């Protein structure tokens, strides 16, 4: 999944970015003022994302712990930084962050499914930005190795707390344990 960067355009305000992308096709994020587009995710990416969404719906949405959303939905971390995570959770106690068009501030949990061309962005830049905004858990999913890394917020950093592979379990600090992460994929 290649991202194209529009370097001659910069935005300092979220509303200006929203107006700019309104008539542009595809998905757009804003990284420190620079808009980036990305094409549709692959079939494998969709399968993995759906599996995690179903797990999160069972663990979060059905018992009334909060809301679960999937891309594309803007997450405005700052005026000049807007991402569209593959999946995100906003717990009930932070429902004030939900807006009609976007999430204002940090979701409680963010899940990103890796692509080779976006791995650096997901593992470094996004992780840094999510930590600075206060995302409490960040899950990085590698569909090729069937591995999940769970990062937790400690101070101003998201640090690796544990990994799961294949049919392993994640011990989330926010929601009950999840099993069978990649079963049948």
Image (cartoon, rainbow, N blue to C red):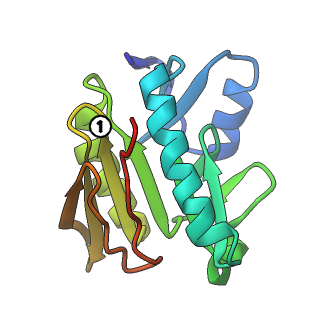
The residue positioned 64% from the left and 44% from the top of the image is: 73
The residue carrying mark 1 is 121
The 10 Å Cα crowd at callout 1, few under 14, some 14 to 19, many 20 or more, is some
Tell me if 108 is positioned left or right of 154 in this view: right
Tell me if 164 is positioned left or right of 36 in this view: left
Quarter of the image for residue 155 reads bottom left
Quarter of the image for residue 94 reads bottom right
Task: Name the residue furthest front.
Answer: 184
Quarter occupied by the N terminus: top left
How many discs appear?
A: 1
In-front residue for pair 97/87: 87
**Image location of residue 42, percent across then percent down:** 46, 20
**Image location of residue 150, percent across then percent down:** 28, 62
Tell me if 112 is positioned left or right of 120 in this view: right
- Label 1 SS: helix
The residue positioned 36% from the left and 45% from the top of the image is: 182
Task: Name the residue furthest bottom.
Answer: 93
Task: Name the residue furthest right.
Answer: 100
Tell me if 167 is positioned left or right of 89 in this view: left
Position of 50 relative to 28 (above/below): below
Position of 28 relative to 31 (above/below): above
**Image location of residue 185, percent across then percent down:** 39, 35
In-front residue for pair 50/14: 50
Residue 90 in view, yes or no: no
The residue positioned 31% from the left and 67% from the top of the image is: 170
Quarter of the image for residue 14 reads top right
In-front residue for pair 139/12: 139
């Amino acid at each position: 999944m290649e991202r194209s960067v529009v370097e001659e355009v910069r935005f300092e305000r979220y509303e200006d970015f929203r107006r700019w992308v309104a008539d542009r096709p595809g998905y757009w994020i804003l990284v420190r003022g620079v808009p980036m587009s990305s094409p549709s995710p692959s079939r494998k990416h969709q399968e993995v994302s759906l599996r995690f969404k179903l797990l999160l719906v069972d663990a979060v949405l059905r018992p009334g712990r909060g809301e679960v959303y999937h891309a594309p939905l803007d997450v405005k971390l700052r005026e000049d930084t807007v991402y569209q995570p593959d999946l995100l959770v906003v717990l009930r106690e932070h429902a004030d962050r939900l807006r009609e068009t976007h999430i204002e501030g940090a979701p409680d949990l963010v899940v990103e499914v890796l692509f080779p061309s976006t791995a650096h962005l997901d593992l470094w830049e996004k992780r840094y930005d999510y930590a600075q905004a206060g995302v409490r858990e960040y899950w990085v999913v590698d569909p090729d190795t069937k591995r999940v890394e769970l990062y937790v917020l400690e101070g101003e950093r998201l640090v690796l707390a544990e990994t799961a592979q294949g049919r392993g379990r994640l011990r989330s600090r926010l929601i009950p344990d999840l099993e069978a992460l990649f079963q049948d994929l």
